[in-house]
Amino acid sequence: MKYVLGILVVFLFWNCEEKKEEGVNYVYQGPLMTTENLSVMYSDSGNVKVKMNTAKQLKMQNEDEIYPKAIYVNFIDKNGVEYSSLRGDSARFFKAEQYYKIMGNVFFFNRLQQQSLSTTELIWSPIKRRIYSTKSVSIKTPTEEVRGVGLDADQDFTKYTIRKPTGVFAIDSVAMGNDTTRF
């Protein structure tokens, strides 16, 4: 009886085993490479312009890169001084299009102009040296707090344009051609 029961158990396991189709190749879709504690520097004419740091990078088969942990990007002037910084909870680099999508609690700070940007998603193009967003944004300066949906800016956040702005902001009445400004 034990012998018959043993054959029955083996037969059941053998029949429950996942059948693999012969001649079918399965393609691995995961990362080709994982890098821990990554630090990347972008330079121009031998001068470091941008430093990027993250705890983890996954390099995919199509050469896209996934940064599942916080990413930090620092912009550096010609004297080697950091003047703007960008951080997000995670990011992805799209190799074919050459841009980064920074996601999560995105925060950008320009020390020179004392202005900050908060959003949930930001596109950074190192090639075009621009940042973009189609999401809600909030910008704070020492004198203004502006909100809107959508943003176009220089990559160092020195100049920007907000689409659909709302909030409290100053308007130069001389530039408007008026001696006084009325709302």
Image (tube, rainbow, N blue to C red):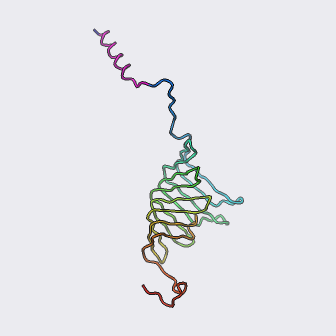
Is 81 magenta? The answer is no
**Residue, x 48% and y 51% (percent of image)?**
69
Number of disc labels: 0
In the rendered image, which quarter contains the N terminus? Answer: top left
In the rendered image, which quarter contains the C terminus? Answer: bottom left
**Residue, x 34% and y 12% (percent of image)?**
7
Question: Viewed as shown, does residue 178 lie left or right of 41?
Answer: left
Query: Which residue is the extreme one toward the right?
Result: 45
- Vertical position of residue 175 compared to residue 137: above or below: below
Query: Which residue is the extreme one toward the bottom?
Result: 179
Question: Viewed as shown, does residue 16 lie left or right of 130?
Answer: left
Q: Give the magenta part as a residue range.
A: 2-19
Instruction: Pinpoint residue 23: horizontal percent, then vertical percent.
Output: 51, 25
Instruction: Pinpoint residue 99: horizontal percent, then vertical percent.
Output: 57, 55
**Residue, x 56% and y 47% (percent of image)?**
64
By secondary structure, the bulk of the magenta-drawn segment is best described as helix
Instruction: Pinpoint residue 62: horizontal percent, then vertical percent.
Output: 56, 43
Q: Looking at the rendering, which quadrant does residue 167 occupy?
A: bottom left
- The foreground one among 123 and 106 is 123
- Vertical position of residue 143 compared to residue 162: above or below: below
Is 4 magenta? The answer is yes
Q: Looking at the rendering, which quadrant does residue 17 occupy?
A: top left
Instruction: Pinpoint residue 119: horizontal percent, then vertical percent.
Output: 45, 63
- The foreground one among 93 and 58 is 93
